[in-house]
Image (cartoon, rainbow, N blue to C red):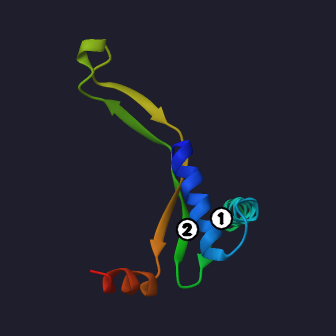
Amino acid sequence: MQKSETEKFFNMLSVEIGTDRETATKIYYNFVRFIVKTANSNNVIRLPNFGDFVIKIYKSKVATMKGMDGFGIDGKRTVVPPRRIMSFKPDRKLKQHLNKQL
């Protein structure tokens, strides 16, 4: 997000929740920190009527580098390390609300 977009977001948030911009910014960043901390310890965080943030763990695998002949490594095998990826699954109520607006 560019600086002007970030400022606009926090201005809109402060108006929506009826507080000053500094307080709205603190609430937002504390909420994000809470989501990350909880997801890291539980691999999932459920936000009522909004959805779930889920951490998926992808195992290590061997990959073949295809289409890299120009670099002299076509067909070379390499190990891709394990990764943790966060995904979002929206709640049924959020989906219904969004679809009402169409």
Residue 22 coordinates in the image, percent (x, y): 75, 59
In this orientation, which residue lies closer to the viewer: 27 or 45?
27
Can residue 52 be seen here? The reply is yes
Give x and y (percent) for residue 13: 60, 67
Q: Is residue 84 left or right of residue 35?
A: left
Going by the image, does 7 lie left or right of 97?
right
Say left or right for 35 vs 82. right
Q: Can residue 82 be spotted in the picture?
A: no
Secondary structure under the numbered disc 2 in the rendered image: strand
Q: Position of residue 60 (x, y in %)?
A: 50, 44
| Along the viewing direction, whichever of 5 and 45 lies nearer the viewer | 5
Residue tagged by mark 2?
53
Q: In the structure shown, which secondary structural element does the residue marked by tag 1 occupy?
A: helix
Name which residue lies at 52% across and 77% down: 51
Q: Amino acid at mark 1?
A: Ala
Task: Give the residue drawn at x 55%, y 68%.
Answer: 53
The amino acid on which the numbered mark 2 sits, given as a three-letter code, is Phe
Instruction: Tell me which residue sits at (73%, 66%) in the image.
Output: 20
Provide the residue designation for mark 1: 39
- Residue at x 61%, y 59% (from the top left corner): 10
Q: Indicate whether 15 appears above or below 9.
A: below
The quadrant in which residue 35 appears is bottom right
Disc 1 and disc 2 in contact, CB within 8 angstroms: yes
Up the image or down, 29 lies above or below 64; here it is below
- Number of on-image labels: 2
Mark 1 vs 2, N-terminal side = 1
What is the spatial separation of the Cα atoms under label 1 and label 2, in whole angstroms?
A: 7 Å
**Residue 9 place in picture, x, y as percent:** 55, 59
